[in-house]
Image: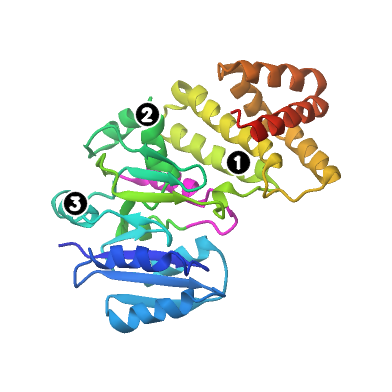
Amino acid sequence: MKKVSVIIPIYNVEKYLNNMVECILSQLQQDDELLLIDDGSTDKSGAMCDNFAARDERVQVFHIPNGGVSNARNFGLLNASGEYVQFADSDDFIEPDMYACFSEIVNTYHPDIVMCGSLQINTGRGTNTVVAPSMETYLSNRDQITEYLNGISLNDMKCLIHYIWNKWYRRDFLMNNKLTFSSDLNLGEDYVFNCTAAKVMKTLYMVPNTYYHYFIRGNSLVSAFQPEPWKSRQILFDAHKSLYKFYDIWNDNKNAIMLEEGKMCFAALRSVNSQRCKLNCKEKTEFLKKMSESKQMKLIIFYLKNSGKKLHKIWLFLICTFGITGIQIMLLVDYINKKKGVK
């Protein structure tokens, strides 16, 4: 059986850590390892990690100064010894047969990457969403990978590019291609990592099972307001574009990619209404000004033109006619609708 190293960055997750660690240890074989990277936690998380290591020799703990999730993952990768690595999150859950399934796959096919689907649980809204590959598939050459990427469904795209925790990566594949996480990004570092990995991978195995349960919580980075989204979104868009240009299928897929990216940029624009946005009125105006002058506004307009929603046509008219004033009007309407529970 192939040895796997599971790498988990830890930062102030004492409430959830025990459940995640226990579900992983219950699946690991004797020659597997769990690397807990305590990223400068200030709660009991660090001590909990030490307790896990004291009672289970498969657990290794590293206490490092707080440097962010990318730095913690890179540190874990440098200290891993498994033939495959998984970058799991500290507050999620893994179904009990995931590792057995993945082990059989890597023993048989030795792919660069093996990935599965996920059940995404929004704790605030009380909703569950399945995001999974459309079918079980093994891609073993560039032509097959190109065909897969060309016209890929949104769910498959999310599984491949948006997430890292639903995958095992062959460690030699990562090390030989010098694949690491960018510390310059505080959101989307996994997206850029996967776009780069997809350019150099030779083989990919996919299973539609939702083995990984991902929890979307109110304190997650995904739900946080980003003060300069135009910077990170441009990096993500460039990485996606580069991937499709590499396979020479950008022209056939650019509208679909621009539409999805425009949707994300639109969400970043609307995030000024988030409870986690602490900007005052003047700062919000400055934020909107910079957003409206960025390249991302063109993607937002493209999305609004093609989304098919009636309300988006109003957004489009007011933005194109009145600029920032139009945006502010619609944000006020958006805020009122949220209060009423209207999407």
Q: Quadrant of residue 316?
A: top right
Q: Residues within 10 Å of mark 2 (few under 14, many from 20)?
A: some
Quadrant of the rendering where the C terminus is positioned: top right
- Give the residue at mark 2: 152
Dot 3: what SS?
Answer: helix
Question: What residue span does the magenta drawing correspond to?
Answer: 181-201
Q: Residue 309 at what x, y percent from top left?
A: 58, 18
Q: Eyeballing the image, is 105 above or below 129?
A: below
Nearer the camera: disc 1 or disc 3: 3
- Identify the amino acid type marked 1: Arg
Are the residues at dot 2 and dot 1 in contact (C-beta closer than 8 Å)? no
In this orientation, does residue 74 appear?
A: no
- Identify the amino acid type marked 3: Cys
Are the residues at dot 2 and dot 3 in contact (C-beta closer than 8 Å)? no
What is the spatial separation of the Cα atoms under label 2 and label 3, in whole angstroms? 24 Å
Q: Residue 203 at what x, y percent from top left?
A: 26, 44
Task: Say how the picture is coloured.
Answer: rainbow
User: Residue sitting at 33 percent across and 64 percent down?
Assistant: 6
Q: Residues within 10 Å of mark 3 (few under 14, many from 20)?
A: few
